[in-house]
Image (tube, grey):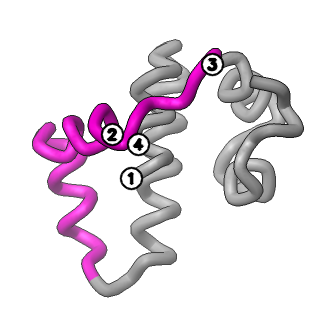
């Protein structure tokens, strides 16, 4: 994917550095909705999703922070799955 093809909420994110965004743009294809849904049962993801019920803004920031952790571990696919939740 080209950097310009990143979703606006990713390009405008203050959580992701320019370097993070460049890494995110290296993925050939985005995970499917089914692939994204499959990670919701992982304990660390499940916990995040339930911790911020009713506070979408905080939830999005914390999901982006979690995605950033995956990026730092070079788990690009997993980072995208978290971003797309």
Residue drawn at (33%, 39%) of the image: 36
Residue position for label 4: 82
Instruction: State the CA–CA distance, disc 2 to disc 3.
Output: 15 Å
Of 29 and 60, which appears nearest the observer? 29
The image position of residue 46, as x and y in percent, is 16, 52
* Marks 4,2: beta carbons within 8 A: no
* Marks 1,3: beta carbons within 8 A: no
Task: Report helix, strand or loop for mark 1.
Answer: loop
Task: Report helix, strand or loop for mark 3.
Answer: loop
Vertical placement of residue 57 versus 4, above or below: below
Residue drawn at (43%, 53%) of the image: 63
2 or 3: tag closer to the N-terminus = 3
Q: Tell me the tag on residue 27.
A: 3
Residue position for label 2: 36
Label 4: how many residues lie within 10 Å, few (<14), some (14-19) or many (20+)? many
**Residue 9 relative to residue 81: left or right:** right
């Amino acid at each position: 994917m080209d950097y310009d093809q990143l979703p606006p909420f990713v390009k405008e994110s203050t959580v992701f550095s320019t370097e993070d965004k460049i890494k995110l743009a290296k993925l050939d294809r985005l995970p499917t909705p089914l692939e994204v849904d499959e990670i919701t049962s992982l304990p660390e993801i499940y916990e995040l999703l339930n911790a911020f019920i009713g506070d979408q803004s905080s939830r999005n920031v914390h999901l982006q922070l979690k995605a950033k952790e995956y990026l730092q571990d070079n788990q690009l696919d997993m980072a995208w799955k978290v971003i797309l939740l």
